[in-house]
Amino acid sequence: MQGKWGLFTHYLADTASNLKPIALPVDDWNRRIDAFDVDGLARQLAEARVPYFVITLGQNSGFYLSPNRAYDEIVGIKPSKCSRRDLIADLAQALAPRGIRLMGYLPGTAPAGDAIAKEKLEGKPDKRMTEFQRNWEAVVREWSLRWGKSLSGWWIDGPYDAAAYQHPDAPNYRSFAEALKAGNPDSIVAFNNGLRTPLYSMTEYEDYTPGEIERDLSVAAGNTPDFSRLANYDRFLNGAQLHVLTIMGEWWGKRPLRFPDELTIGYTKFINSRGGVVSWDAPLTLEGHIDPEFLPQVTALGRAIGK
């Protein structure tokens, strides 16, 4: 809440929400990750006064930007599609001296575009996806323990079957949150249960609202029963910090720029006035720099909002 806004990025082997397998050699993925300029990105973020930065660890392709032994042991793919370089650790090292918090994005599901990994992670599916949940908790726990306090939070895309995670016995939302916080009990977690408004919180075990919106900019929690006025958002929704995640471009990680600076700044200030926070998604280049079309708006937003 003190940060007021942050930058969210999809840095993937493919494109956001792609469900088809991709033909990318593992060596090419490693070369791309090795060439990611963490110091250059850190300078850009600092100059733009970005308080926190969220980056994808991976999504549907099965390629991840950090090694993970638990994942490799479960899926058995060789050579591993987890990068040799631990990009999260290197980013944290570059961002921490500049006072910028780092957070990670990860789906709450197996990679849909990697049939082998999906089969191994899910095992014998039941209604609660019990085997998958336990496997995935092992994967995220390894990352969390390795990074410790270097990672300040998580945005988990899904799980979409909320009923499976609201079960009173583990694995459930509670055990998933505990695995994510294994290395840093003070980290914050949100579980995204789909794109919808008004903003919501699915479980007491998340710390902030997932807040995903795309086409509309949500401004109120709904109408009062007599429709006489809008029911404004409060700082907390069912105990979760008010947070919005939306896109600065026309799609996640894609050009062109969607709004003029005044609208991006104004909407951020509006959510801030309700005690909330806005994460804006913007593209990165392959080298890990903020897309030059978006950098001026990111910088204008940082100057307007401040710290």
Image: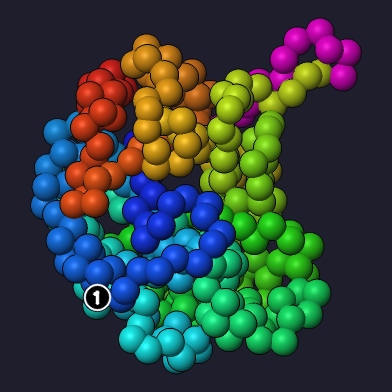
The one nearer the camera, 168 or 264, is: 264
Q: Is residue 232 magenta?
A: yes
The one nearer the camera, 286 or 221, is: 286
What's drawn in magenta, residue-wise? 225-235
Above-or-below relation of 61 to 189: below
Above-or-below relation of 192 to 163: above
* Left/right of residue 1 with respect to residue 196 in the rendered view: left
Which residue shows up at 16% across the image and 39% down it? 44
Which residue shows up at 57% across the image and 39% down it? 211
Which residue shows up at 79% across the image and 62% down it? 163
Which residue shows up at 72% across the image and 15% down it? 230
Q: Quadrant of residue 89?
A: bottom left
Image spot of residue 147 (x, y percent): 30, 70
Report helix, strand or loop for mark 1: helix
- Structural crowding at the residue carrying mark 1, measured as other residues with C-alpha within 10 Å and reported as few (<14), some (14–19) or many (≥20): some
The one nearer the camera, 219 or 290, is: 290
